[in-house]
């Protein structure tokens, strides 16, 4: 009787284990596919984020270059105003020295 039970039970257990293993493998494959999709989406999200960062950095570089060009232009304007003011002061002091020289002759 034990022999008959083993002959019947053993194949049944093996079949059940095989079915369970197949189900586990199917679930594992489904989970693996899901993880792959999640990783792909995360990679795409990171790539988009990196692209935005690079574009933003490029815009900032362009803005900085424009700002520096404006600063050079403004600096040239201020330098020119300063040069003219110094010239006016030199002329004014020269006139004052002439006037002072006139008064010192008395």
Image: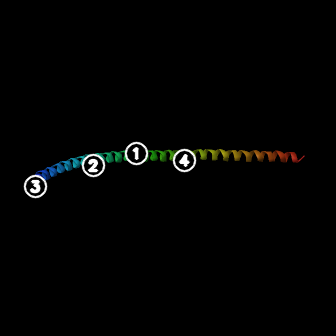
Residue beneath disc 2: 32
Distance Cα–Cα, label 2 vs label 4: 53 Å
Quarter of the image where one finds residue 70: top right
Distance Cα–Cα, label 2 vs label 3: 42 Å
| SS category of the residue bearing label 4 | helix
Image spot of residue 49 (x, y percent): 40, 45
Q: Which mark is residue 49?
A: 1
**Front position in the image: 68 or 38:** 38
| SS category of the residue bearing label 1 | helix
Distance Cα–Cα, label 1 vs label 4: 28 Å
**Front position in the image: 46 or 38:** 38
Q: Residue at x 63, y 47 (%)?
A: 79
Ranked by sequence position, the earlier of labels 1 and 2 is 2
Image spot of residue 37 (x, y percent): 30, 45
Residue beneath disc 3: 3
- Rate crowding at label 2 as few (under 14), some (14 to 19) or many (20 or more) other CA atoms within 10 Å: few
| SS category of the residue bearing label 3 | helix
Distance Cα–Cα, label 1 vs label 2: 25 Å
Image spot of residue 27 (x, y percent): 24, 46
- Rate crowding at label 4 as few (under 14), some (14 to 19) or many (20 or more) other CA atoms within 10 Å: few
- Rate crowding at label 3 as few (under 14), some (14 to 19) or many (20 or more) other CA atoms within 10 Å: few
Ranked by sequence position, the earlier of labels 1 and 4 is 1
Ranked by sequence position, the earlier of labels 3 and 4 is 3
Distance Cα–Cα, label 3 vs label 4: 95 Å
Residue beneath disc 4: 68
Ranked by sequence position, the earlier of labels 1 and 3 is 3
* Labels 1 and 4 touching (C-beta < 8 A): no
Q: From the viewer's perspective, is the residue at label 1 or at label 3 nearer? A: 3
């Amino acid at each position: 009787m034990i022999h008959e039970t083993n002959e019947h039970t053993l194949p049944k257990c093996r079949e059940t284990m095989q079915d369970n293993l197949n189900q586990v493998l199917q679930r594992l494959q489904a989970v693996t596919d899901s993880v792959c999709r999640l990783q792909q989406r995360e990679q795409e999200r990171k790539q988009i984020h990196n692209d935005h960062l690079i574009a933003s950095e490029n815009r900032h570089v362009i803005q900085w270059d424009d700002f520096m060009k404006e600063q050079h232009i403004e600096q040239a304007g201020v330098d020119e105003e300063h040069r003219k003011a110094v010239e006016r002061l030199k002329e004014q002091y020269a006139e004052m020295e002439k006037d002072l020289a006139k008064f010192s002759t008395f």
